[in-house]
Image (cartoon, helix red, strand yellow):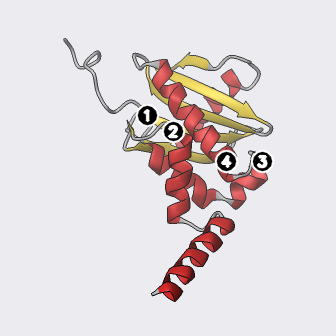
Amino acid sequence: MDSQTEPSLYTVKAVLILDNDGDRLYAKYYDDTYPTVKEQKAFEKNIFNKTHRTDSEIALLEGLTVVYKSNIDLFFYVIGSSHENELMLMAVLNCLFDSLSQMLRKNVERRALLENMEGLFLAVDEIVDGGVILESDPQQVVHRVALRTFLFPSQVLQSAKEQIKWSLLR
């Protein structure tokens, strides 16, 4: 069995979010397939040009498997090697999209995303670490992100009420 078909935990090569013009809003590469920013941006333009007018969810491009989804003015991409399981990559994509949808209160569009970039960074880090898929349940991702930030003021308020209640009961 050669190294190309050997099973590996390192399934995700990149996670990208591009805007309507194909410009990068978020990009995280997990290997050296595209080592320079210039190569990465050229790859992103190529992906965008091949996918922005189609309704499909998967593409094979430059020897890579690309799963993608668009919403209003954003394009979400998860990239793996050509022999990677598309269902695993799609699970990552759906988890990312659903997590952002919950965190942004179903308002997944460019402006809302740019205003909440810290939540995006944390969500991607909870889903994928170094190319290894850690989580595919959006509820868990949102919960973990909420624990690390103050994205949800109502939850913070509830937590403060609980702490005050317990301190008064002592």
Instruction: Using residue 89 as the reference point, say whether residue 25 is left or right of it.
Output: right
Tell me which residue sits at (41%, 33%) in the image. Answer: 33
Determine the secondary structure under disc 2: loop
Q: Which mark is residue 13?
A: 1
Q: Quadrant of residue 90?
A: top right
| Earlier sequence position, callout 3 versus callout 4 | 4
Instruction: Tell me how far mark 4 sits from mark 1, CA to CA.
Output: 25 Å
| Earlier sequence position, callout 3 versus callout 2 | 3
| Earlier sequence position, callout 4 versus callout 1 | 1
Residue 115, given in percent of the width and then of the height, sits at: 71, 60
Instruction: Using residue 56 as the reference point, say whether residue 37 is left or right of it.
Output: left
Tell me which residue sits at (62%, 65%) in the image. Answer: 155
Q: Nearer the viewer, mark 4 or mark 1?
A: 4
Residue type of the residue flagged with mark 2: Asp
Read off the residue under disc 2. 137
Q: Nearer the viewer, mark 1 or mark 2?
A: 2
Q: Nearer the viewer, residue 107 or 53?
A: 107
Residue type of the residue flagged with mark 1: Lys
Q: Quadrant of the N terminus?
A: top left
Read off the residue under disc 3. 107
Tell me which residue sits at (40%, 41%) in the image. Answer: 134
- Disc 1 crowd rating (10 Å Cα; few below 14, some 14-19, many 20+) is many
| Earlier sequence position, callout 2 versus callout 4 | 4
Read off the residue under disc 4. 102
Q: Quadrant of residue 13?
A: top left
| Earlier sequence position, callout 1 versus callout 2 | 1
Q: Nearer the viewer, mark 3 or mark 4?
A: 4
Name the outermost residue toward the front.
169
Determine the secondary structure under disc 1: loop
Residue type of the residue flagged with mark 4: Gln
Instruction: Tell me how far mark 3 sits from mark 4, CA to CA.
Output: 9 Å
